[in-house]
Image (cartoon, rainbow, N blue to C red):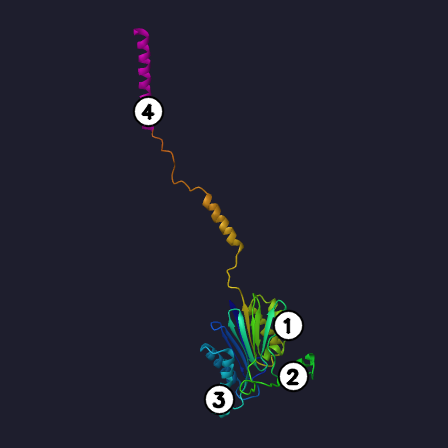
């Protein structure tokens, strides 16, 4: 069974929220998109992306096909309406089949696996900093604060990828998949995200605490994310179940309560008749003894 919570917040600096989120537990689909800031109508771009992907998945298309169709929808809309020209969006999407999932992304919105071993990033950023890292020009530590973190190399509506990147994975009992925009992964260290989720008693409280931490850090961007957790769909055994069974078992061997009494009520008249009958019998016995003594 999958449980989830999602957050989509404007933040404290942006004039409007250009993020969009879809959480469709029926389809097993979660989508997080971040309209590219500085481009025209980022909010329209992110909405069109998530809605197109959800619609295509519902129609039976594969995850990769659905993302490609969303990219085509952005390009088509920008060509048909001049005011939408240049719009773009990132996206990260997961499609579950039971506890197994497919994951696809374009841009720098991320997917993390949170399990007993820690937090690990499943996606790779499509930005300049990551390209420089792969080329060995900068170190991993330098890439985290490099200006290229904010320069996308791929985005929905403007990408030139030959194939949408996709990975397969699965969640085990208690594991969590986190999909997020850089509005979460930017202000917060990965260690903080991991510890916050682990220390929270529920997904909802984890989501609320993560948002609070981002707001405390200034929330310079829109903040959107989904937390998806897998739990075995098995009824948990409680101690009270054993107590209940024990009580039932004890009750079954207790003799049934008698309704009324097994003795008749005392009847005085019947008792007197019984005594009178005994007196007559005694008199006859005595008469017989006297007769035998004197006449035989």
Name the mark on residue 129. Answer: 2
Q: Locate residue 85, reporting x and y percent.
A: 52, 91
**Mark 1 or 3, nearer chain start:** 3
Question: For the residue labelled by badge 1, is the local secondary structure a helix, a strand or a loop?
Answer: helix
- Which circle marks residue 3 in the picture? none
Q: Which residue is mark 3?
A: 76
Q: Earlier in the sequence, mark 4 or mark 1?
A: 1
Question: Which callout, 2 or 4, points at the residue further toward the start of the chain?
Answer: 2
Label 1 vs label 2, nearer the camera = 2
Residue appearing at x 32%, y 27% in the figure: 270
Residue designated by label 1: 192
In this picture, which residue range is highlighted in magenta? 268-296
Task: Determine the residue positioned at 31% across, 7% down.
Answer: 294
What crowding class fits label 4: few (fewer than 14 Cα within 10 Å), some (14-19), or many (20 or more)? few
Q: Mark 4 or 3, which is nearer the eye?
A: 3
Q: Rounded to the nearest whole Å, what is the CA distance between mark 1 and mark 2?
A: 22 Å
| Above-or-below relation of 72 to 197 | below
Relative to 235, residue 183 above or below: below
Tell me what residue is drawn at x 68 percent, y 79 percent: 140
Residue 207 visible to the viewer: no
| Residue 265 in the figure: left or right of residue 16 | left
Residue 44 magenta-highlighted: no
Q: Nearer the viewer, mark 1 or mark 3?
A: 3
* Residues at marks 1 and 3 touching, judged by CB atoms closer than 8 Å: no
As drawn, 274 above or below 115? above
Which quadrant would the C terminus be assigned to in this image?
Answer: top left
In the rendered structure, which disc, 4 or 3, sits on the residue that comes first in sequence? Answer: 3
Asked whether residue 212 is in view, the answer is yes
Q: Is 143 or 62 nearer to us in this picture?
A: 62
């Amino acid at each position: 069974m999958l449980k989830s919570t999602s957050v989509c917040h404007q933040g404290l600096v942006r004039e409007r929220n250009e993020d969009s989120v879809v959480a469709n537990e029926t389809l097993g689909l979660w989508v997080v998109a971040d309209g590219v800031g500085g481009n025209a109508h980022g909010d329209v771009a992110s909405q069109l992306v998530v809605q197109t992907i959800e619609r295509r998945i519902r129609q039976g298309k594969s995850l990769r096909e659905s993302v490609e169709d969303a990219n085509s929808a952005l390009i088509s809309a920008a060509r048909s309406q001049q005011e939408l020209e240049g719009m773009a969006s990132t996206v990260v999407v997961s499609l579950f089949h039971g506890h197994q999932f497919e994951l696809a992304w374009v841009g720098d919105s991320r997917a993390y696996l949170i399990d007993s071993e820690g937090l690990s990033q499943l996606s790779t950023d499509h930005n300049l900093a990551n390209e420089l890292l792969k080329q060995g020009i900068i170190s991993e530590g330098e890439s985290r604060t490099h200006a290229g973190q904010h320069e996308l190399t791929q985005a929905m509506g403007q990408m030139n990828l030959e194939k949408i990147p996709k990975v397969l994975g699965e969640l085990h009992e208690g594991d969590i998949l986190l999909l997020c925009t850089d509005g979460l992964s930017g202000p917060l260290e990965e260690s903080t995200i991991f510890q916050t989720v682990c220390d929270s008693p529920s997904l909802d409280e984890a989501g609320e605490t993560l948002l609070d931490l981002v707001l405390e850090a200034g929330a310079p961007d829109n903040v959107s994310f989904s937390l998806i957790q897998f739990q075995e769909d098995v009824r948990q055994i409680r101690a009270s179940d054993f107590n209940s069974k024990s009580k039932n078992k004890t009750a079954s061997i207790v003799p049934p309560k008698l309704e009324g009494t097994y003795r008749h009520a005392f009847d005085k008249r019947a008792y007197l008749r019984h005594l009178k009958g005994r007196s007559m019998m005694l008199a006859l016995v005595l008469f017989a003894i006297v007769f035998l003594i004197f006449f035989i």
